[in-house]
Image (cartoon, helix red, strand yellow):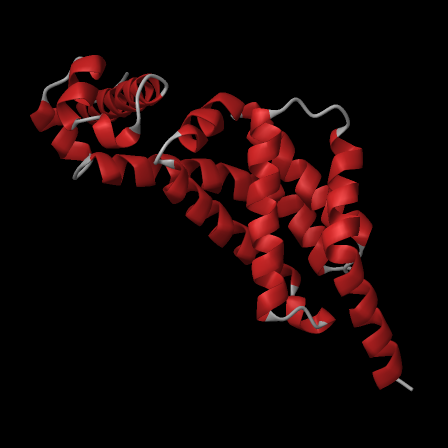
Amino acid sequence: MKTGSDNEDLRIKKTKRAVKEAFYSLLSAKDFEKISVKDISDRAMISRNTFYLHYSDKYDLLNHICDELCRALYIKLSTQLQRAQSAEINIDNVSYIIMDGINEIIQNREKYHILFAGSSRDVLVSKLHELARRVFMEIGPEKYGIDGCSMEYICAGMTGVIKYFVDNDAYDLREQSYNFTRIHLGSIIKISEQRKEYENK
């Protein structure tokens, strides 16, 4: 038997789901800056007071939504991350990480597409950039001589690749992921390997 607490939790989940669905629906029609809390609450069929019980404003809602997408993406990457941590970094294992990530993004393509379309893109791009940095930091870039400048280059490139796959149908995801890794990481990995060989002599 469901308790009062269970019913309350279910109501909260339903309310938040309605708010997010209303927000995506509005974003698909007009830019984030032109959307008000009243617009969102009216579309979700709740009062503004109910909205403010869960979110401080529309910016807080946008941050929550982007955080949820990034959290789901990170969870998807976890298995490949663990494998990469226990092995030497190479083009193959990095390309698999990228491929798994893009697969997850494609599952939520419409949400990403809507968020990338207007001024909301800045929040999403920033969070994806931070996620990319976190992923590569967990691989251990310092072991391979990947410096801060190279990291920024890689992370910026990843956000561009994500947007590309959101806006375009990938005709060969595995090949594209491998090509991106080979082009953007291949030289860094090769230089790192050469330096390690020199240091071990």
Number of numbered discs visible in the structure rendering? 0
Where does residue 172 sit, x and y in percent of width and height? 77, 27
Taking 69 as reference, is 150 above or below it?
Answer: below
The quadrant of the rendering that contains the N terminus is top left
Residue in the picture at 42% in, 28% down = 117
Where does residue 183 sit, x and y in percent of width and height? 77, 50
Where does residue 133 sit, x and y in percent of width and height? 54, 57
Residue in the picture at 13% in, 22% down = 38
Residue in the picture at 81% in, 48% down = 92
Q: Residue furthest right?
A: 201
The quadrant of the rendering that contains the C terminus is bottom right
- Say whether residue 88 is visible: no
- Say whether residue 139 is visible: yes
State which quadrant residue 192 falls in.
bottom right
| Nearer to me, 183 or 175 | 183
| Nearer to me, 70 or 192 | 192
State which quadrant residue 84 falls in.
bottom right
Taking 189 as reference, is 168 above or below it?
Answer: above
State which quadrant residue 23 falls in.
top left
Q: Is residue 150 left or right of residue 32?
A: right
Where does residue 100 sit, x and y in percent of width and height? 67, 37
Residue in the picture at 73% in, 70% down = 144
